[in-house]
Amino acid sequence: MLLIESLMTPDAEPFEVDPSHALDLVTLFASANHDAKMEANAIHGVLEANGIPSLVVGTPQIPSLEFQVQVPRAHLEEAERVLAEAKEAGPAAAVEAERASEDAD
């Protein structure tokens, strides 16, 4: 039997595993449209900018498969709210936010 402890480097600190389902990934967005990759990446960027961890799942090599954006179950409601706010604000808000970030640099 292979023990995980034997794979850890000597300086690695032990950690506890959260057995709850709060960290299970759930699908927030799914699309097989021609622009699904771009939309998934845009959603991923909005979520990450708001501190919500997310993962883009999909492969451009097989265009018939869909792209998905997945988030931990514990963050799903917040992710849906952030995404709805971003859609409501529209492209003008994105341009304004980018301009503000450029001015800050």
Image: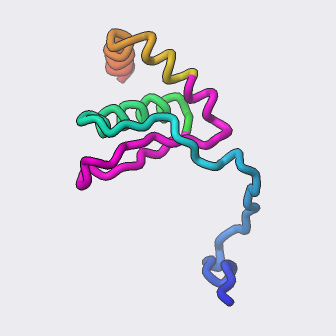
Quadrant containing the N terminus is bottom right
Number of marks in picture: 0
**Vertical relation: 67 (above or below) 29:** below
**Vertical relation: 13 (above or below) 59:** below
Q: Residue at x 73, y 68 (%)?
A: 14
Query: In the visual, does 92 lie left or right of 18?
Result: left
Quadrant containing the C terminus is top left
Q: Residue furthest front?
A: 64
Q: Position of residue 50 (x, y in %)?
A: 53, 28
Q: Position of residue 51 (x, y in %)?
A: 55, 33
**Vertical relation: 78 (above or below) 2:** above
Q: Position of residue 47 (x, y in %)?
A: 49, 32
Query: In the visual, does 3 lie left or right of 94?
Result: right
Q: Nearer the viewer, residue 11 or 40?
A: 40
Q: Position of residue 62 (x, y in %)?
A: 26, 53
Q: Residue at x 75, y 57 (%)?
A: 19
**Vertical relation: 12 (above or below) 7:** above
Q: Residue furthest bottom?
A: 1
Q: Nearer the viewer, residue 66 or 100?
A: 66
Query: In the visual, does 44 lie left or right of 8?
Result: left
Q: Residue at x 41, y 49 (%)?
A: 57
Where residue 79 sits, quadrant-wise, is top right
Where residue 46 sits, quadrant-wise, is top left
Look at the image and give the residue range highlighted in magenta. Answer: 53-80
73 in the magenta segment: yes
